[in-house]
């Protein structure tokens, strides 16, 4: 499907593999406004991976570089995932 980040629409794909590396769970392609999440994982792992890749898109659109946020994105995805799961009302319009 799609997600908007800072007014930019990113398409979301869920292929069996996201690139040549079988252990890569997701990938954000900024130039194509594309988030790819490996399909063959548990729902929880797909959701965590989506949040991680979404954070990449957010940081990129905010002007940060990869070196600035890779570790931060890894840490934040776990905390943000848990906050959203424990507080589902946050996602309701």
Image (cartoon, rainbow, N blue to C red):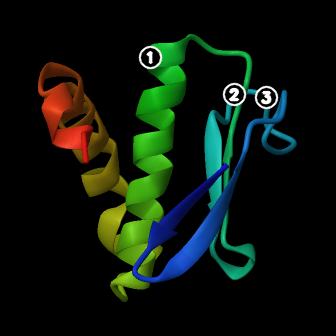
Residue 38, position in %: x, y?
71, 31
Q: Which residue is mark 3?
A: 22
Q: Are marks 3 and 1 in contact (CB under 8 Å)?
A: no
- 77 vs 68, nearest the viewer: 77
- Residue in the picture at 25% in, 40% down: 91
Residue 80 lies left or right of residue 33; in this view the side is: left
Circle 3 residues within 10 Å: few <14, some 14–19, many ≥20:
few
Describe the element under mark 1 as helix, strand or loop.
Answer: helix
Q: Which residue is mark 2?
A: 23
Residue 32: name its quadrant.
bottom right
In three-dimensional space, the C-alpha distance between marks 3 and 1, rounded to whole angstroms, equals 19 Å
Q: Residue furthest bottom?
A: 63
Q: Which residue is mark 1?
A: 44
- Residue in the picture at 12% in, 27% down: 87
Residue 7, position in %: x, y?
46, 83
Residue 13 lies left or right of residue 79; in this view the side is: right
69 lies above or below 1: below
Residue 78: name its quadrant.
top left
Residue 19 lies left or right of residue 53; in this view the side is: right
78 lies above or below 30: above
Mark before the other along the chain sequence, 3 or 1: 3
């Amino acid at each position: 499907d799609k997600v908007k980040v800072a007014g930019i629409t990113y398409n979301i794909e869920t292929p069996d593999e996201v690139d040549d590396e079988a252990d890569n769970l997701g990938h954000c392609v900024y130039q194509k406004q594309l988030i790819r999440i490996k399909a063959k994982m548990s729902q929880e792992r797909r959701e965590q991976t989506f949040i991680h890749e979404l954070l990449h898109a957010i940081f990129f659109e905010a002007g940060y570089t990869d070196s600035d946020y890779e570790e931060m994105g890894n840490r934040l995805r776990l905390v943000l995932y848990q906050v959203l799961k424990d507080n589902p009302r946050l996602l309701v319009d």
